């Protein structure tokens, strides 16, 4: 019997803006909002419902791959999935539950230290907290203690392994070249050197510590793992299966296991999720193979050999762990002539900053906390659920804390959280200090400097920037790390005033006097709102309380906001603590309200700029995502107006235009441009209608062909996909024969449009609907129930349109 374990290390670096705790728009992830969203669409989601195709290329099964492979999800990633992709998150948790039942209580999931820090380069205290936080996150997700833990970049040293063992971690997984020498536990005690990763990967090994603690280590099959990640082994699931099952094992019950980035299955290799699903299907049906996981195998086959690891090594740097502190030559996406000498001053700057923050944390927590470092370990319970603050304070505070002291306490703890986030490994991994991954870790550094400045007079930013100035970008125009910090990092900074200005602009969309709104980790409560509207221009003013969930800090702020012609946005905000409210109201009435009522808009704009105190914001200075919402609204309105004008013109002059074409005259360029705008818009309008009409769709397509007009395929694909998904949601709620026919009709009509549509979500819904309803209705059909017979026939037809092998999916799905 051969045991096979396929491990996926699923991880994305934390990308949230440290001031708002939400991810800003990342243009490089287009057409998605950000890279988490993109990789989720390409990998994490597809692996929850991976297609297995039959001989005719039709879907015969849909598998949740996470049920069948070993996996770990980085805590910062899985928390994002829980919030922004709850369906994917739920499927991952379900897979762990399923696998634990299947493998005698040993689930497929293993843990990971909190934020992918290179553990050998961390101080002991950070190592311990990273491991404790990783364990707690795992327990929260999966309801059990983790048996194993994946090390970031498999970077390893003995201190880290011992802390893991002391925390109850039973095993980890390393690359074969990280083994130094081995010996049999029951042998003569002699060690055997391991050369060039030649360790036997079919068995677990034991690392011993004194006194008595231990941890098991699995060394994955390096050659097959490499060919999956960087070769073409995922081109065919059958080939992958053959490579795995052909590995010889000495005693007939050894372990064949591989480990790669989980993103290999779909993000790095398109359709890798399908190759994996097909391989799983083949191996599950092979009586000589057991698809297992590390925990189950270890319980059945305890280590018979000991190993000495090679400390300060990793799976992605041939020089050990130099990739994260020096110009070792290991890099990704580098250009000729570039170097990574910037890595050393970057690490030096962060190490210096970390040590300053330790002093600030210890000095300012004195009198607040019983044990500041024990409190930091337990702070993860608050990170998971902010409602746990009161319990946390009761456990760790020396005495009951006032509101101001609570804010100070959580500011100190946030300093420590962000001080660890700034060591996320991706910051050093790539070719230049200007990449978004390095900019991100520098944002965490800027955040801790910001937080520390609120409680300490110590200047830590100036020396930090001085050290950063030694790190030179390979792109001369970007300068040094200091320039990147100033130009690419600090503009991301957000405070209560910027949040208030964004809310003030948002208030122009609300027609009520009191409103609550959340912007990231900020909760805004608006009150005393005044609103004036003359049809084209809007003016609002009022008060708000801006409170952050993170530290509990809050500000009372007054605001005024104005838009002219729905395009020219201005807002001014004041902190109430520094405000003479009566004087401000008089000034606002004179400079703004009165001119607005008189229709003197230019005077209103001048008044907003002349008002005393506060801070003036233009549209370009509020939060980027809000800017994009406003611009998108303008674009939709302009597009509607332009299309309506063109429609009227073309209808009025249709006969003249037709005559020009019949007589083979060339249309004026601006007239052709109008037609090229109008026809795709008409197509999109019909797609979005309640029930698109085939004759209208085909009519528009015919006109487009006639005039040689093309449409933007991605835009049309998104419109069709969304319309089908909306209609499928209606069908799921009421899966009667009329709804099935309506959906089938819509799908048939849309198939007339020459664009490939991603039917993944629709197919998943159909698959679940068939699984839920077909057994019962098919029984009625067999009893000659006419409605049931019609339903079965229509659902079969719909399945064929959705590329299912209908007979196969009703004959046997995943159990």
Image (cartoon, rainbow, N blue to C red):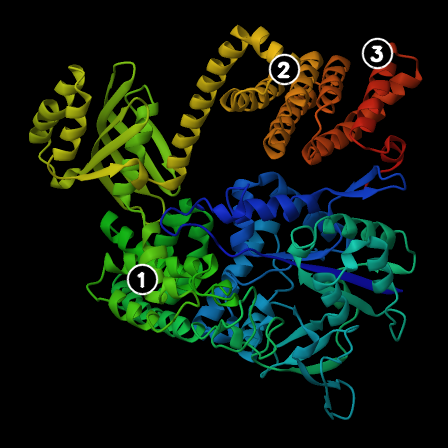
Q: Secondary structure at mark 3?
A: helix
From the image, which quarter does the N terminus lie in? bottom right
For the point 45% across and 56% down, which residue is it? 380
Q: Given this view, does label 1 or label 3 mark the residue nearer the observer?
A: 3
Which disc is residue 621 wearing? Answer: none
Q: Is residue 559 visible?
A: yes
Q: Secondary structure at mark 1?
A: loop
Residue to which mark 3 is pinned: 787
Q: CA distance from mark 3 to mark 2?
A: 52 Å
Q: Secondary structure at mark 2?
A: helix
Residue to which mark 1 is pinned: 369
User: x, y (%) of residue 411?
Assistant: 31, 55
Count residues near mark 2 (Cα–Cα under 10 Å), then give few for <14, some for 14-19, many for 20+: some
Q: Given this view, does label 1 or label 2 mark the residue nearer the observer?
A: 2
Q: Which of pointers 1 and 2 lies earlier in the amino acid sequence?
A: 1
57, above or below 302, in the image: above
Q: Which of pointers 1 and 3 lies earlier in the amino acid sequence?
A: 1
For the point 59% across and 78% down, which residue is it? 313
Q: Which of pointers 3 and 2 lies earlier in the amino acid sequence?
A: 2
Residue to which mark 2 is pinned: 661
Q: CA distance from mark 1 to mark 2?
A: 84 Å
Q: Along the horizontal axis of the image, is 45 left or right of 652?
A: right
Q: Along the horizontal axis of the image, is 4 left or right of 557?
A: right
Q: CA distance from mark 1 to mark 3?
A: 70 Å
Q: Nearer the viewer, residue 591 or 215?
A: 591
Q: Is residue 400 visible?
A: no
């Amino acid at each position: 019997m051969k045991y096979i374990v396929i491990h996926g290390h699923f991880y994305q670096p934390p990308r949230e803006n440290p001031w708002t705790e939400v991810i800003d728009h990342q243009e490089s992830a287009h057409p998605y909002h950000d890279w988490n969203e993109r990789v989720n669409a390409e990998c994490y989601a597809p692996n929850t419902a991976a297609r297995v195709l039959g001989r005719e290329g039709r879907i015969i099964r849909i598998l949740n791959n996470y049920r069948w492979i070993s996996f770990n999800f980085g805590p910062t990633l899985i928390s994002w999935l829980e919030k922004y992709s709850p369906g994917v998150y739920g499927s991952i948790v379900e897979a762990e539950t399923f696998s634990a039942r299947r493998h005698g209580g040993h689930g497929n999931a293993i843990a990971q230290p909190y934020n992918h820090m290179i553990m050998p380069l961390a101080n002991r205290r950070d190592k311990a907290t990273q491991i404790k936080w990783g364990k707690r996150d795992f327990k929260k997700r999966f309801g059990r203690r983790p048996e194993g833990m994946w090390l970031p970049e498999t970077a390893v040293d003995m201190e880290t392994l011992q802390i893991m063992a002391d925390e109850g971690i039973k095993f980890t997984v390393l690359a074969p070249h990280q083994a130094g020498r081995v010996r049999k536990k029951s042998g003569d005690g002699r060690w055997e050197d391991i050369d060039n990763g030649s360790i036997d990967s079919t068995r677990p090994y034991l690392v011993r510590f004194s006194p008595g603690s231990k941890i098991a280590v699995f060394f994955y099959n390096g050659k097959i793992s490499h060919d999956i990640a960087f070769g073409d082994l995922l081109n065919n699931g059958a080939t992958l299966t053959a490579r795995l099952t052909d590995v010889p094992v000495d005693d007939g019950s050894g372990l064949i296991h591989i480990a790669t980035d989980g993103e290999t299955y779909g993000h790095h290799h398109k359709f890798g999720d399908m190759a994996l699903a097909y391989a799983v299907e083949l191996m599950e049906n092979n009586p000589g193979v057991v698809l297992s996981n590390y925990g189950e195998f270890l319980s059945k086959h305890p280590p018979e050999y000991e190993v000495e690891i090679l400390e300060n090594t990793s799976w992605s740097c041939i020089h050990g762990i130099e990739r994260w502190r020096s110009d070792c030559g290991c890099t990704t996406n580098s250009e000729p002539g570039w170097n990574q000498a910037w890595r050393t001053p970057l690490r030096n700057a962060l190490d210096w900053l970390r040590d300053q923050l330790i002093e600030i944390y210890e000095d300012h927590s004195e009198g607040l906390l019983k044990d500041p470092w024990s409190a930091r370990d337990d702070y993860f319970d608050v990170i998971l659920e902010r409602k746990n603050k009161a319990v946390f304070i009761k456990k760790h505070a020396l005495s009951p804390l006032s509101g101001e002291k609570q804010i100070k306490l959580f500011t100190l703890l946030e300093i420590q959280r962000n001080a660890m986030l700034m060591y996320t490994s991706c910051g050093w991994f790539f070719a230049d200090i200007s990449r978004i991954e390095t900019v991100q870790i520098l944002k965490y550094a800027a955040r801790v400097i910001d937080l520390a400045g609120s409680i300490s007079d110590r200047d830590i930013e100036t020396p930090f920037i001085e050290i950063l100035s030694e790190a030179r970008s390979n792109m001369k125009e970007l300068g040094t790390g200091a320039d990147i910090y100033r130009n690419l990092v600090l503009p991301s900074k957000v405070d209560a005033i910027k949040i208030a200005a964004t809310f003030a602009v948002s208030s122009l969309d609300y027609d009520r006097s009191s409103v609550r709104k959340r912007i990231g980790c900020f909760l805004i409560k608006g009150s005393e709102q005044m609103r004036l509207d003359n049809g084209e221009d809007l003016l609002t003013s009022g008060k708000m309380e801006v409170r952050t969930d993170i530290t509990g800090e809050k500000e009372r702020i007054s605001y005024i906001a104005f838009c002219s012609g729905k395009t020219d946005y201005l807002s001014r905000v004041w902190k109430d603590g520094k405000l003479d409210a009566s004087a401000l109201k008089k000034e606002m009435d004179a400079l703004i309200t009165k001119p607005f009522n008189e229709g003197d808009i230019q005077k209103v704009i001048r008044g907003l700029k002349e008002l005393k105190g506060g801070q003036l914001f233009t549209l370009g200075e509020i939060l980027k995502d809000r800017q994009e919402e406003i611009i998108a609204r303008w674009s939709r309105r302009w597009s509607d107006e332009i299309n309506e004008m063109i429609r009227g013109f073309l209808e009025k002059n249709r006969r003249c235009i037709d005559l020009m074409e019949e007589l083979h005259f060339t249309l004026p360029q601006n007239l052709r441009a109008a037609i090229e705008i109008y026809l795709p818009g008409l197509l999109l309008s019909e797609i979005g209608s309640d029930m698109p009409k085939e004759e209208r769709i085909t009519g528009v397509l015919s006109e487009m062909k006639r005039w040689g007009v093309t449409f933007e395929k991605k835009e049309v694909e998104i419109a069709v996909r969304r319309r089908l998904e909306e209609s499928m949601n209606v069908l799921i709620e009421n899966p009667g024969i009329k709804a099935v026919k309506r959906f089938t009709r819509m799908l048939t009509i849309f198939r007339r449009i020459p664009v490939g549509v991603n039917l993944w979500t629709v197919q998943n819904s159909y698959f679940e609907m068939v699984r839920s309803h077909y057994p019962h209705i098919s029984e009625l059909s067999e009893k000659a129930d006419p409605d049931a017979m019609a339903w079965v026939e229509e659902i079969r037809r719909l399945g064929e349109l959705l590329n299912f092998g209908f007979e196969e999916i009703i004959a046997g799905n995943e159990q």
